[in-house]
Structures are given as C-alpha cells and as structure tokens.
Image (tube, helix red, strand yellow):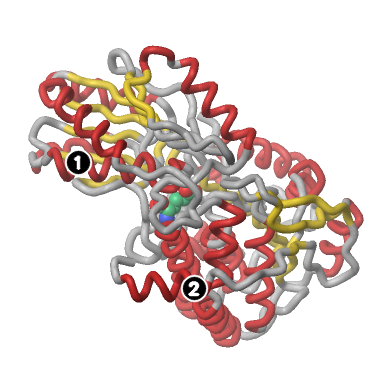
Amino acid sequence: LSDEGTLARINAARQAPLDLKAAPMIAAEATGEAHTVYNPATGAAVGEVIHADADTVSRALEASAPWTAPVSERAAVLRRAADLYERNFGPIFAILAQEAGKTMLDAVGELREAVDFLRYYADEAERRPDAKPLGRVTAISPWNFPLAIFTGQISAALATGNAVLAKPAEQTPLMAAHAVALLHEAGVPRTALQLLTGDGPTVGAALTSDARIDGVVFTGSTETAQVIRRAMAANLAPGAPLIAETGGLNAMIVDSTALPEQAVRDIVASAFQSAGQRCSALRCLYVQEDVAPQMIEMIKGAMDELSVGNPWHLSTDVGPVIDREARDQIASYIAAAGNRVLHQLPSPAEGTFVAPALIQVDGIEALEREVFGPVLHVATFKARELGQVIETINATGYGLTFGLHTRIDDRVQQVCDRLHVGNLYVNRNQIGAVVGSQPFGGEGLSGTGPKAGGPRYLNRFCAPTPQTAQESWDSTTDAATLQR
Ligand code: UN1
C-alpha cells in the first residue's frame, strides 16, 4: 500500500457501480421481509437485504446435505474460491468500506486473511483423509470481520465435508452474500452451503436449537455465546460442540525498559486500528510509573496524527463504528468517564463516528466490561506491583490477547508462565494474528478453543475419533469454558 501505483489501481477497482442486494441463498424457496443496509460513515442506503422468515429456515434445514465429494475435490473447490476472492478484490473492498466502514488497510488485511483461511483449511483437510464430518453445522459470524471470519468458519466446516447453514451478522449481509456467490461459483454445492440472512431471534435461535444441527461455530460476544450454549444444551444432541471465539478485556504491560517509540506505535495500532472493533484490540494499558507521564504524552501526540473519517478516503486511519447503537453506547461510556478522559479527538459530525479516546484508570483496576470501540484505558504501576497487575488481568476471567513491552528477558518468561491468555505478543502490536503461523483464540470467557487458523481447529469439525477425543478441548473442557 506504500506504492502509489498499486494504491491507485486498487482504488480504481473499487469504483465500479455495484448492485448490492442480499437474500437467503438456500436450496429451496426463500421468503422474508426486506430491510435497508446503511453505510455507517455517511448514513446513505447502500443496499437491501431480505431477512429469512421461520419457514425459510426450516426449508433450509430440510434441504441441507453434507458435502460427500472426496476431500481432494473439496480442497480443490476451496482453492478455486480463494482465487475468485483474490480476483474480486475491487467489489470486495467496495463492500467492506461501504457496509462495514473498513479502511483500505483493514480491507486488504481482511481479504488476505479470508484467502489464507480457504487455502489453509483445504491443506489441513487433505491431511485428514479418513475424517468424517459432524453433519450439519451452523456458522454465526460477526460484523467486524464480515469476510475473514465468515469465510474462516465456513471453509473449516466445508473442508471437512459438513453441510453449513451460515447466519451472517445483521449489519453485514451484503459481504456475506457476495462471498457465498463466489463459493457457489467455485463449485460448493448449494445444499452444502446455504446462507440465512436475518436476525438473531428468528434465524440464530432456530439454527442453534434445532435437533438436526450437529455443531455450532460462533464468533461474537461472550454473552451471546452463553445464550447459544444454553439453547444447545436444551435442545441439541448432547455431543454437539460449540466452537466459540468471544470477547476480551485485553491488556498490555509496558515497563520502564521498553523502547518508547516502538511501544507507542504498537499501543496506538492495537487500540485504534479498525476503530478498536477487534476482539483482539488493546483495552487497558498498564505503564510503569516512572515512564508513564512521558508515555502518555507520546500517546496523545500519536492520537493527534490519526485521521478519523470516511474510509472511502485513502488517507483515513480510523473509520466509523458499526452503527448508531454502538456509537451511542460508546459515546455515553466516554461521557460517563468525565474528567478521567485524558484525551479525545474531535468526531466527524455525520455518520456513526466515535473519535479515539484515552481514559485514565485509578489504581491497578481491571475493566468491568468490554467496550467495543476506539477507547483505550491507561493505568500505572510501581515496579514491585507487577505481580498484582498480572493477577488483576487473570482475575477478569477473560484471556484473549495480551501485549508486553520490555527488554528484560526473564520478565517475558515470568509473564508467559503466569498469564492465562490465548495470544501473547511481545514487543509488537497485539492485533493481526496470521492464519497458519499465529493461530488465534482465547481462554476462559474468551472462547472454547481450539485456535482458528491452527493445526487442531479442523478436528473439532469432525466426528471425534479416540485420538481427537483426548485433546484438551474435549467435551469436558468445552463445557467448563465460558462459565467462569
Ligand atoms: C476478532 O476481532 O474477532 O488478530 C478476531 C486479529 C484478527 C482476529 C481478530 N486476525 O486481529
């Protein structure tokens, strides 16, 4: 993206006019009501979506059939889909910007990740030639990665031969419909991959409680995962797994040996890239007291450099939050912080923007809840209080990402040994896990495991074998997570 010629070419490719429509894509007749999809940056209508009604969901369940083609053929189709995704970068970037408020940097990363998932799970499935699928899998995906996580869930389930019933987030049906069209074009049978655009109470509830469902894969809030687990416990076969990746109260520790410029760059990226709308984003920074005043001034200075605005403009660093409800909730949270707000940029007047904010935390406190937006909290600690900081982070019960900036080698080991966290990043930012080389997932309230984009992930989408049943995510562990 630093090359102007490439940027101009990418930008030109997303200018083509699009007819943005989404509807249930099922192997039977679909019916439902029309709703408008809005651009969070401008408030303009960008497309239309039909929400599946209850009859459509039950027709889809009826029509659903596992993908019985040999694994080599399934893998070839998924690789073909990866190629189609790459060739379609223009419309994909246009939809990501207009429907999900994604900056170009985020959109490029998202497409890359989606393509990586398709190829990685195709390869992984071929390593398990004798595996049997679970059967029918429900995939419920979030709006913050409407292409990458949507595709990751679906491709894991399809690679292993399952039938998928996919319910995308209500805010991002257009990206989902475009992706499913490409997957069908690549050769995924329509009975193996069905899309059910719609709302949680109609579509989500039916697809997580119907006895014909053999497993659920979900990414979203911890609270919704708990609702899904209860629905599954009441109605599904007792062995049906929930594979969940949920929220976090992600922290970073910066001690007095850290390199200040590097730490500040990584703090600002971790907290504010994607407008803080990543489950991996940094929420609470703990800075050692003697370097805190300087560090806080540098963070404020770096925040001032951020350009907040419409992601359609290539110079934008921070786009809108997803919708009005999110904007109002985050804005009132910041307002309630009163004089603990150390710094906040001005917000654009139009659209659902929340400008990045820095909020002071008194003492070594943990945050009470995840605020899913560009809000960074900062606390200070004395050298002898490091242990207490780690205990405080562990005590939240969440354990998704964690960042550490230090130049003391022993400290890295000490922190690694004591923190209960899925992804621990040292002397770098704490977002942007990479499929294959940095699998992503959390502990405790942050998810069930196994990690997405990792070598054990596909096992969970297969009927258990004596060997896979031994793995640490077996049903006992699975039932114990999300309940702390
Ligand atoms: C999420 O925000 O739901 O590490 C997942 C990252 C991403 C995963 C984030 N690859 O930022």
Please state if 137 lies on the left or on the right of 390 as rendered.
Answer: right
Identify whether 217 is placed above or below 290: below
- How many residues crowd around disc 2 within 10 Å: few (fewer than 14), some, or many (20 or more)? few
Identify whether 442 is placed above or below 294: below
Q: How many marks?
A: 2
Position in image of residue 303 (x %, y %): 31, 37
Q: Which mark is residue 12?
A: 2
Which of disc 1 and disc 2 is earlier in sequence? 2
Q: Is residue 410 visible?
A: yes
Q: Which mark is residue 263?
A: 1
Please state if 58 lies on the left or on the right of 412 as rendered.
Answer: right
Gap in Å between the C-alphas at discs 2 and 1?
Answer: 35 Å
Using the image as rendered, state which of residue 7 and residue 334 is in the foreground. Answer: 7
| Secondary element type, mark 1 | helix
Q: Quadrant of residue 205?
A: top right
Position in image of residue 421 (x %, y %): 35, 40
Q: Is residue 472 visible?
A: no
Which amino acid type is shown beneath numbered disc 1? Ala
Which amino acid type is shown beneath numbered disc 2? Ala
| Secondary element type, mark 2 | helix
Using the image as rendered, state which of residue 269 and residue 228 is in the foreground. Answer: 269
Task: Say which quadrant the N terminus sits in.
Answer: bottom left
Position in image of residue 56 (x %, y %): 87, 59
Identify whether 59 is placed above or below 204: below
- How many residues crowd around disc 1 within 10 Å: few (fewer than 14), some, or many (20 or more)? many
Position in image of residue 364 (x %, y %): 29, 17
Q: Is mark 2 within 8 Å of ligand 1?
A: no
Q: Is mark 1 within 8 Å of ligand 1?
A: no
Using the image as rendered, state which of residue 354 and residue 272 is in the foreground. Answer: 354
Q: Residue at x 63, y 62 (%)?
A: 175
Q: Residue at x 47, y 22 (%)?
A: 334
Identify whether 65 is placed above or below 149: below
